[in-house]
Amino acid sequence: MIRNLPTSRVRSVAIGLAELSGTARPAETPLTSPVRQLPCAWWKVRVTRYEPGAKGQEQSRVVLNTGAAAPFQLDDGTGMIRVEPAGAEVTGVQTCNIRINAGDEPAFEIRRYAQTNGYWSVWPTIAFRIEEWAILTEAPVYVLGQVERTGGLADRRRMRVAEILKGWLASPEQKRVFDTNQDGVLQPEEWDAARAQAQSAALTESPAADAAPHLAVRRPASGWFLVCSGSERDALAARGHPALWLAGGTVLVVAGLWQVLAGVG
Amino acid sequence: MTGIAVLVVLGVVVFAVAGYGAALYNRVIFLKNQGDRAWYNIDVLLKQRHDEIPKLIGVCEGSARFERETLQRVIVARTAAVGAAGVADRAKAEGELSAAMGKLFAVAESYPELKSIALFSQLTARVSSLESEIADRREFYNESVTNYNTAIETVPTNIVAGWAHAHPRDLFKVAAADTADVEVKLNL
């Protein structure tokens, strides 16, 4: 799929399945990776605990495997498009892969992470590996997903008008300004006047909000949704060649069956 | 028992080969549909451009001194582009229309009264924006078609191309006139 689909430009991307490549920019709620404290749009942390086994061999156990994702903007130089990575198959860049043996003194951010997550108390006796992956903002990103329309300008203005009105009416002083007959209740004509003022305020306050993209890349109802740090080449490298998987799988199945049947014989 | 083992292994191999064949067939169909979709996505923009041009001509006609020859060239090129069928003919006609539009914009530079009309500025900005989008989608279409043509002509996908009724497609080639510089004459 990655090989077969040409890369679109944000400026001219069409609705439907599309492949985009550019720089990840923070959206309204950027994340911070918990270990390295890097600004990102997605992160995943895995903590593995190592303990001595019965026969003196070390045994490992994953004690934490967690992550978070937030919408971000993909900027390819021709425009920006919102990417909502929820439900995507994400391949992030590894930002931390450190094993701390019992008694080691880890770097400051590792120690802080261990302390805030309750691993520090057992550190002197048990070894851990902390791994972190992230889709960093202000770094290259590759996306393959469904381009859909988000709410248009009219919808966003309507929402902004509602927000402004809500803010005004929460303030008793401001509410009194609209309550022209001072009866404590906003009559329909007073309500209309307040809404007209809010519409006027919404129109004048933020030209940048109007310039925001009207499209978003999301998970399709069925099919692929990939978000990958780096370029298309990195995405391909992360997934491997499907023909090799098929050939390798066949060889393994044939070898396994041969062994089983030879054993039965 | 060895005979059964050989049969089972052969069965697995046949199953794997059939699966691989199906994957190749699906790839050809995907590329074919992707080419269709890429073409329809260009077509949408071309039609939008066709719709904007009469408005632009209308504004230019409002300027009494505007060169009739330039406008006539755009009108003729637009009519030819609207009537063209097939990718190759369409590409040629749209290229001529782009060249005619380029000439119109260049000539308009020497009509300050035209440039001062807000509607003219809006329409030229709109048409220029459409031109950029068409260029992007043309590139996308050509890449989609190249992937498709390459797939159906190379081993092993060419084996299943016949079953998928896949035939080579034309690229959306840019006419030389579309890429040539426009000579600008200013009435100073």
Image: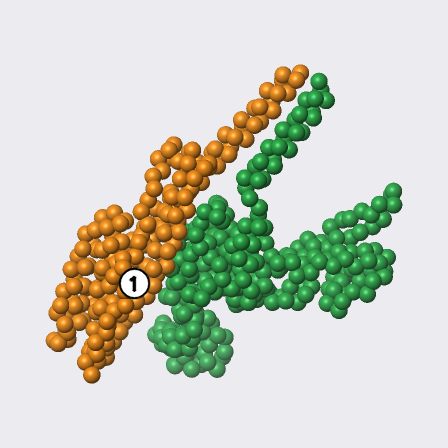
Chain colours: A green, B orange
Q: Nearer the viewer, residue A174 or A68?
A: A68
**Disc 1 target residue:** B179
Image location of residue A42, percent across then percent down: 59, 60
In the rendered structure, the answer to whether residue A46 lies left or right of residue B143 reads right
Residue A265 visible at all: yes
Q: What residue sits 73% from the left and 67% below the top?
A: A109
View extreme (bottom): residue: B188
Q: Nearer the viewer, residue B169 or A91?
A: B169
Residue B126 visible at all: no
Q: Is residue B173 above or below residue A178?
A: above
Disc 1 residue type (three-letter): Thr
Task: Tell me which corner region of the image, top left, top right, bottom left or bottom right, holds residue A264.
Answer: top right
The local secondary structure at tag 1 comes to helix
Q: What residue sits 77% from the left and 57% below the top?
A: A99
Q: Is residue A62 above or below residue B155?
A: below
Image location of residue A120, percent across then percent down: 80, 62
Q: What residue sits 62% from the left and 20% below the top?
A: B6
> Pointer 1: residues within 10 angstroms few (<14), some, or many (20+)?
few
Q: Chain of mark 1?
A: B
Image location of residue B154, percent across then percent down: 43, 39
Q: Nearer the viewer, residue A13 or B3?
A: B3
| Quadrant into which the C terminus of chain A falls | top right
Task: Tell me which corner region of the image, top left, top right, bottom left or bottom right, holds residue A119.
Answer: bottom right
Q: How many marks?
A: 1
In the rendered structure, the answer to whether residue A86 lies left or right of residue A47 reads left
Q: Is residue A119 above or below residue A240?
A: below
Image location of residue B129, percent across then percent down: 32, 66
Q: What residue sits 28% from the left and 68% below the top?
A: B181
